[in-house]
Amino acid sequence: MKNLIISLFIFGISLCSQAQAMGTKGDFIGSAGMGIMTSPTLFLISPELEYVHSDELTLGGLAQMGLGGGGVLFTASGKVRHFFGGNPRVKPCIEGGLGLSLASSLFSSAVGVHIIAGMGFDYILDKRTSIGTMVRLNFSPPLQSFFLSWPIVTMRFLL
């Protein structure tokens, strides 16, 4: 039992002591997330592709597909994500973007402007992989004024 506790302690220290970032300038990061959209409640699939501009900033595209309830809500947006904080493993972030929304029979209009603002964090697993979450506020005036999307789990990979 003592050896197990010592091994776990050493493993924990090694995890916390490795300062890492997801990629360097010029790299691309691909990700996929699953979660929920609310108002109405839909199953969310959320792929992303990002360009690493610096250790703190990525630029990229985001698609969100909400499925269920007899309809589909799709958004495609360009976005900017900013990372901050001093922890080498946990990277809090905020993001914002602009794009288009498309919807089926759930909503009064089929096409609209899409504005997103989000916050979340990534946990760096290694230099090429992280896992995280992001809560996004979505504004799409022609479709409906507001909906929330939450990819509960998002895996990010350095391409």
Image: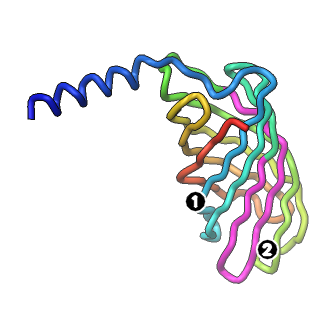
Q: Nearer the viewer, residue 69 or 22?
A: 22
Question: Pointer 2: residues within 10 angstroms few (<14), some, or many (20+)?
Answer: some
Question: Pointer 1: residues within 10 angstroms few (<14), some, or many (20+)?
Answer: some
Q: Residue furthest left?
A: 1
| Image: magenta residue range | 62-82
**Residue located 61% across and 33% down the image:** 128
Amino acid at dot 1: Gly
Q: Position of residue 121 (x, y in %)?
A: 55, 36
**Residue located 83% across and 48% down the image:** 77
Direction from residue 62 to residue 120 in the image, left or right: left
Q: Position of residue 122 (x, y in %)?
A: 55, 36
Q: Which residue is mark 1?
A: 35
Direction from residue 10 to residue 115 in the image, left or right: right
Residue 146: quadrant of the picture: bottom right
Q: Overall secondary structure of the magenta stretch?
A: strand
Is residue 67 within the magenta segment?
yes
Q: Which residue is mark 2?
A: 107
Amino acid at dot 2: Phe
Q: Identify whether 14 is placed above or below 41.
A: above
Q: Nearer the viewer, residue 133 or 156?
A: 156
Residue at disc 1, secondary structure: strand
Q: Residue furthest front?
A: 3
